[in-house]
Image (cartoon, rainbow, N blue to C red):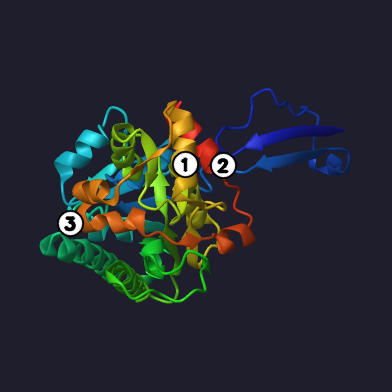
Amino acid sequence: MEVFCSLSWTHSISSRLHIPHSFSVGETNRFRVICSAAQSPKANLMTVSVTGATGFIGTRLVQRLHADNHKVCVLTRSKSKAETIFPVKNFPGIVIAEEAGWKDCIEGSNAVVNLAGMPISTRWSPEIKKEIKESRIRVTSKVVDLINSSPQGVRPTVLVSATAVGYYGSGTSETRVFDENSPSGNDYLAEVCREWEGTALKVDKDVRLALIRIGVVLGKDGGALAKMIPLFMMFAGGPLGSGQQWFSWIHLDDIVNLIYEALSNPSYKGVINGTAPNPVRLSEMCNQLGNVLGRPSWLPVPDFALKAVLGEGASVVLEGQKVVPAKAKELGFPFKYPYVKDALKSILS
C-alpha cells in the first residue's frame, strides 16, 4: 500500500491521511509514505536595509520588496518624511529608523541597499556641489562602517551600492562606447563617483559588493523626465542642445529589478552598469518623446534654457556618454524596456 502526500511546511499534516489500525511494525515493507516536501515560502525571504529609500528609485524598490513579503528597514534622516511615503496602514511591518537606529537595523539584515545622496539634476552652487559629494560619501562610509563592525553571525552578506555613469566623465566622446572596464573621466561628477565607489569598496571582503553605475532613470513623477517635459512642451519639443550627445537611460522598473536581482543572485558582484542596452542620441530621445506626447520635435531646446533650470547640473543631460550594460547582458538580466520608445510609452501613456 502506498500513500502519496505533498506536505507544505506551512501547514500541518492533513487529518484526512488515515493509517489503518491494523498497521504494525512487522508490516513496514507493505506501507510507504512518499512525500514531496514543498519548500517553505519563507525560505528565501530577506531582511533588507535601504538608504535613500524615500528617493525616486528607493521608493519603488521598497514597494517591490514589501509586496514580495521581504522585511524592509528604511534608513533615513527624516522619520516624518519616510512615514509620509510609507504609511503604516499601507506598509505594515516596515521599520523606519533614524541614524541612531541604523546599527540595529543593519545587524539584523541579510542585505543593505545604499541609494542615498542629494539629487544631481539640480542647480549646482558651490555649496550644492559640496553636498552632492559629501552626502554620498558620508552615508556610504557610515553604512560600510556599520556592516564591518557587525558581529560575524549578524553581518549582512550583501551590499548593493549605487554610483552613476558620471564615473566615465561627461562630454568625453561622441563616438566612444563605455562599459564597466572603461576608465574614469576627469570632471567633477567622475571625481564624485570615484570617491563614492572607493568608499563602498572598503566593505569587508566577506560581503558581496555590487556597485550599480546608474544612468538617467526614466519613470513617472520624478527623475530627469519630470524636468525635461515642461521644457520640451515650452519649446515645441525639440532636442536639448546639439542633440548629438548620447543619452544613457534606464526605465525605473528595470533599475529596480536589477538592484532586486543583485540582492539575491551571487553572480552579481563588482561594477554593473545600470543602463538600458540601447542608449540613444538626445535628438532621438526627443523625437520619441515628441511622438508619445503628440508634439512636433523640430525646434531645439536651447542650452541656455536647460542651464536656466539646472545650472551646471545640465551637464548630466547635455554632455552624456554612450554607456552599455555589458555585465548585465552577460549575466542574462532580462530588460523589460530595452528600447526608449517602449519605455516612454509605458511611462506617459
Mark whose residue sits in front, 2 or 3? 2
Q: CA distance from mark 1 to mark 3?
A: 28 Å
- The type of residue carrying mark 3 is Glu
Instruction: Using a 10 Å C-alpha cutoff, classify the residue at mark 2 as few (fewer than 14 neighbours), some (14 to 19) or many (20 or more).
Output: few
Q: Which element carries disc 1, helix, strand or loop?
A: helix
- The type of residue carrying mark 1 is Asp
Q: Which element carries disc 2, helix, strand or loop?
A: loop
- The type of residue carrying mark 2 is Lys
Tell me: residue 286, above or below residue 260: above
Instruction: Judge whether residue 150 can be spotted in this image.
Output: no
Q: Position of residue 341 (x, y in %)?
A: 53, 38
The residue furthest top is 16
Q: Nearer the viewer, residue 244 or 337?
A: 244
Q: Position of residue 328 (x, y in %)?
A: 57, 58
Residue tagged 1 = 253
Say whether disc 1 or disc 3 marks the residue closer to the N-terminus: 3
Q: CA distance from mark 2 to mark 3?
A: 35 Å
Q: Which element carries disc 3, helix, strand or loop?
A: helix
CB within 8 Å, label 2 to label 1: yes
Instruction: Judge whether residue 205 can be spotted in this image.
Output: yes
Q: Nearer the viewer, residue 53 or 241?
A: 241
Say whether disc 2 or disc 3 marks the residue closer to the N-terminus: 3
Say whether disc 2 or disc 1 marks the residue closer to the N-terminus: 1
Quadrant in the rendering for residue 314: bottom left
Residue tagged 3 = 99
**Which residue is drawn at the image coordinates 42% and 55% (left, top)?**
215
Q: Position of residue 85 (x, y in %)?
A: 25, 36
Residue tagged 2 = 336
**Which residue is drawn at the image coordinates 44% and 49% (left, top)?**
282
